[in-house]
Every structure is written in structure tokens, then in C-alpha cells.
Amino acid sequence: MIGCTSWLVPGTWLENAHLAQGLVDYEELLVASWDPDTQSTLEHELPELLTLDLQYAVHLPFSDAADAWDAYRFFEGHRFPALNYVLHPMAHWSDYAWGDRVALENLKDVVEPYERMVFDVGHHLLGKRFPDEWKSRVVEVHAMGVQDGKDHLALDPATARVILPWVNDQTLLTFEVFDLDALTTSLRTWEASCAG
């Protein structure tokens, strides 16, 4: 399945989902803070998000494990049908009883083993390497272009070749680019890479 981040244009999760619908199979809801405004917006938008022709994953890139846990419990409490939850290996994250749809992402400076993992190609190429022997743990790939020390660019053929071995029929492939044009370019590049 192919997905994208929920930040293609400045706006809400719902506004971005309307743009993603028809381009990808799922949208990864980027929830980077946990405060009353965030919770209120999600309360309002979740019902309509579920009416769109999209599935969803949830990315919780918090540095505070308690905030990540509260956000996770919010989605679970709403019985939100998340394909996957993406966590960062923050301090004390393992103190909580995460469910079986949670995966841990590799960061530039931290690559911590977990039974379900997210392979971020930008973090892999610009920071600590993701060990090949953990490939079987990867359930999601964060895809993007990586050039001249920068990531989150439109996918380029060279980076696509790095990503290809990490993806199989069961892998969620999330284009972590924050621009609609970069997404459409990335989708074309990926299609050409798979065909070639």
C-alpha cells in the first residue's frame, strides 16, 4: 500500500486528506503535539476522515512518551482503524503497553530494535545505518528523496534504488514529503523504479 503524510499543504488533517484521496491508498496523520486544540480538531475531523476513500496510519513523533501515550489512547478510544502507529524511540517510551499496531522508527541518531519497525530512508542515509539483519521487522518505509545532505525531497531514482529492497507486498510505503508537487513527482518516480 502507498501512502503520504497529512502535511501536503498548510491546513488540517481533513483538508490534506481531500488532496490525498485518489492519489494514495492511505494518509499518515502527523500528530506532532498533544494539546486541547489538537484534540478538538481531531474530534471534529475524525468522523469525516472515515467517510473518504482513504485508509489511515498515525505518526506520533513526540519527544515526551506520556504525550505520545495520551494521543495513542485517544485514537484507540475512538476505535480509529489505524493501519499502523509510528513512534520515535523517545525516553521512557517502553514504559507503556503499546498495542500490536505500533512500530518504532529509526532516527538519525537513534536506531533501537523493536519487533515492528519503520525504516526511514532519510535517517538511514544521513545518520546511523539501519541494520540489514532487522529488515524482516520492517512494516513501514518512510520514503523521500535524499540529496546533498537533505531529506524530505521529492523521490529521486538513486534513493528509490535504496528503498526498493526494504519494500515487499506487505509493507506500508509512506511518502514523507511535505508538498503536493513533491508527492506527485515521488509517485511517478516510484512507479518508474518498480517498472524498471
Image: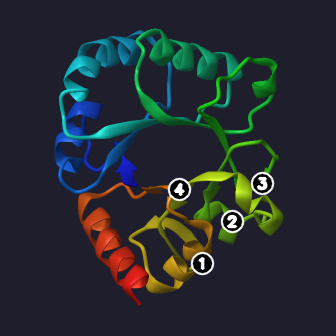
- On the question of residue 47 being in view, the answer is yes
Q: Is residue 83 left or right of residue 113?
A: left
In the picture, residue 16 is in which quadrant?
top left
Residue 111 percent location from the top left of the image? 79, 52
On the image, numbered disc 3 is attached to which residue? 109
Q: Which residue is mark 2?
A: 124
- In this figure, which residue is indicated by the disc labeled 4? 171
Q: Are marks 1 and 2 in contact (CB under 8 Å)?
A: yes
Dot in front, 2 or 4: 4
Indicate the quadrant containing the N terminus: top left, top right, bottom left or bottom right: bottom left
Mark 3, secondary structure of its residue: loop
Residue 53 picture location, percent across and down: 20, 40
Callout 3: 10 Å neighbours few (<14), some, many (20+)? few
Side (left or right) of 97 relative to 20 = right
Between tags 2 and 3, which lies in front?
Answer: 2
Q: CA distance from mark 1 to mark 2?
A: 10 Å
Could you say which disc has been placed on residue 162 in the image? 1
Q: Disc 1 versus disc 3: distance between alpha carbons? A: 19 Å
Secondary structure category for the residue under label 4: loop
Q: Amino acid at mark 2?
A: His
Report the amino acid beneath label 4.
Thr
Q: Nearer the viewer, residue 146 or 75?
A: 75
How far apart marks 4 and 3 lie (CA) works out to: 24 Å
Q: Amino acid at mark 1?
A: Val
The residue most toward the front is 169
Report if the CB atoms under discs 2 and 3 are less than 8 Å apart: no
Q: Front-most of 165 and 119?
A: 165
Question: Residues under labels 1 and 4: Cα distance?
Answer: 15 Å
- Sequence-first disc among 1 and 2: 2
Quadrant including the C terminus: bottom left
